[in-house]
Image: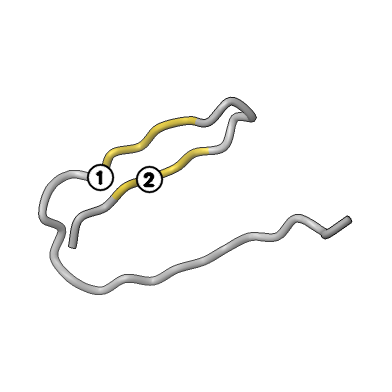
Amino acid sequence: MSARGINKVIVVGRLGKDPEVRYIPNGGAVANLQV
């Protein structure tokens, strides 16, 4: 069994439109970005 961790991503640029955030059944958040 693997331990849960935190993923960190840094993206530099201009967004094409506002981020879309949705929530998955276990309560986690997923964001879609257009750069």
In whole angstroms, how far apart are the C-alphas of marks 1 and 2?
Answer: 6 Å
* Color encoding of the figure: secondary structure
Q: Please, is residue 19 above or below residue 9 in the view?
A: above
**Amino acid identity at mark 1:** Pro
Q: Residue furthest top?
A: 25
Count of marks overlaid on the render: 2
Instruction: Tell me whether circle 1 and circle 2 mark residues in contact (CB < 8 Å).
Output: yes
Please provide percent x and percent y for residue 16.
10, 55
**Amino acid identity at mark 2:** Ala
- Label 1 environment density (alpha carbons within 10 Å; few <14, some 14–19, many ≥20): few
Please provide percent x and percent y for residue 32.
32, 47
- Label 2 environment density (alpha carbons within 10 Å; few <14, some 14–19, many ≥20): few
Please provide percent x and percent y for residue 13.
18, 71
**Nearest to N terminus: mark 1 or mark 2:** 1
Q: On the image, numbered disc 1 is attached to which residue?
A: 19
Please provide percent x and percent y for residue 4.
75, 55
| Side of 5 where 10 appears, left or right | left
Q: On the image, numbered disc 2 is attached to which residue?
A: 31
Q: Residue furthest front?
A: 1
- Quadrant of the rendering where the N terminus is positioned: bottom right
- Quadrant of the rendering where the C terminus is positioned: bottom left
Q: In the drawing, what numbered circle is on residue 5?
A: none
| Side of 25 where 23 appears, left or right | left
Rendered residue at 20%/55% (across/down) = 34
Q: Secondary structure at mark 1?
A: loop
Q: Please, is residue 18 above or below residue 16 in the view?
A: above
Rendered residue at 82%/59% (across/down) = 3
Q: Residue furthest right?
A: 1
Q: Secondary structure at mark 2?
A: strand
Residue 19 appears in which quarter of the rendering? top left
Q: Please, is residue 18 above or below residue 10 in the view?
A: above
